[in-house]
Amino acid sequence: MDARRTPLLTALCLGLALAGAGHAAAAPEKARPEKERKAHPPVTLDDLYTRLKQAGDEAEAKAIATLIERRLGRSGSATADLLSDRARQAMGGNDLPLAVELMDRAVALEPNWSEGWSRRATLFWRLSDSASAIADLQRALVLEPRHFEAWAALGKLYLAQEDKGRALDAFRRAEALYPQWDVLRKAIERLKPEVDGREL
C-alpha cells in the first residue's frame, strides 16, 4: 500500500535560429522556446487515472500506477510525511506499536490524507486487527474513491473473513480503476463462480 509522484512533462524546445545565426532576423526566433515551454500544463492526478484505465499493456499500467502512488504518498505536510517515513522504518524493524503511534499522529495532523489511513490500515492488518484495518480503508476510500490499492486491500480483508461477496465487489472496484492489474483479474476469476454462480 505504499506509494505508491512528480510532474512528468518538461519542454525540450531549443533555439530554431542556430542555422541562421549570422542574420539579424535570427534574434526574434530565440524567444519562441520560452513561450512553448509555458504551453505544457502539468499532468494532474485525474490525467493519470484516465491514462491508467487506457493503458495498453501491463508494463505501461504499472508505470502509471507507480506515479499515482507517489502522488498519493505526499500528504502536503512535511511533518506528516516524516512521521509516515518513521512509521515505515518502525514497521521494518517489526516495532508495530510504535509504527501505529506514528501513523496516529500523521493522520491526526492530516485527516484528509487518504494514503495515511491506508498505511495505518496495513499496520492494523499486521497486528491482526481486521476491524480497525477495514475502518481505516473505508475512511481512505471516502477521501479518495479511486485508491485502487485500498480497494484491493479491502478485498483481501473481506476474503480473509470469508465475506466473498464483499471481497469480489472490492476487487472489481479496484479492477475498474486499474484494468491491467493481473493479480486482481485472477482473484476475480477465482471468486466469480462462487459468488455469481457458474455460467451454464
Image: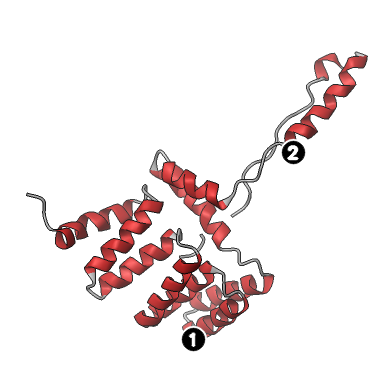
Q: Are marks 1 and 2 in contact (CB under 8 Å)?
A: no
Residue 119, percent from left and from top: 49, 71
Residue 9 higher or lower than 82, as above or below: above
Q: Please report whichever mark, 1 or 2, sits nearer to the chain's N-terminal start.
A: 2
The amino acid type, in three-letter code, at marker 1 is: Pro
Give the camera-side residue of 82 and 176. 176
Residue 131, percent from left and from top: 36, 81
Residue 50 higher or lower than 190, as above or below: above
Q: Badge 2 is on which residue? A: 38
Residue 63, percent from left and from top: 49, 47
Disc number placed over residue 144 in the picture, else none: none
Residue 128 in sight in this render: no
Other-residue count near label 1 (Cα within 10 Å), few / some / many at <14 / 14–19 / ≥20: some
Identity of the residue drawn at 50% across and 67% down: 143
Q: Badge 1 is on which residue? A: 97
Examine the image and state in which quarter residue 157 appears.
bottom left
Q: Secondary structure at mark 1?
A: helix
The amino acid type, in three-letter code, at marker 2 is: Lys
Identity of the residue drawn at 26% across and 70% down: 159
Residue 159 in sight in this render: yes
Q: Is residue 59 left or right of residue 81?
A: left
In this rendering, the label closer to the viewer, 1 or 2: 2
Identity of the residue drawn at 56% across and 58% down: 70
Q: Secondary structure at mark 2?
A: helix
| Residue placed furthest toward the left | 200
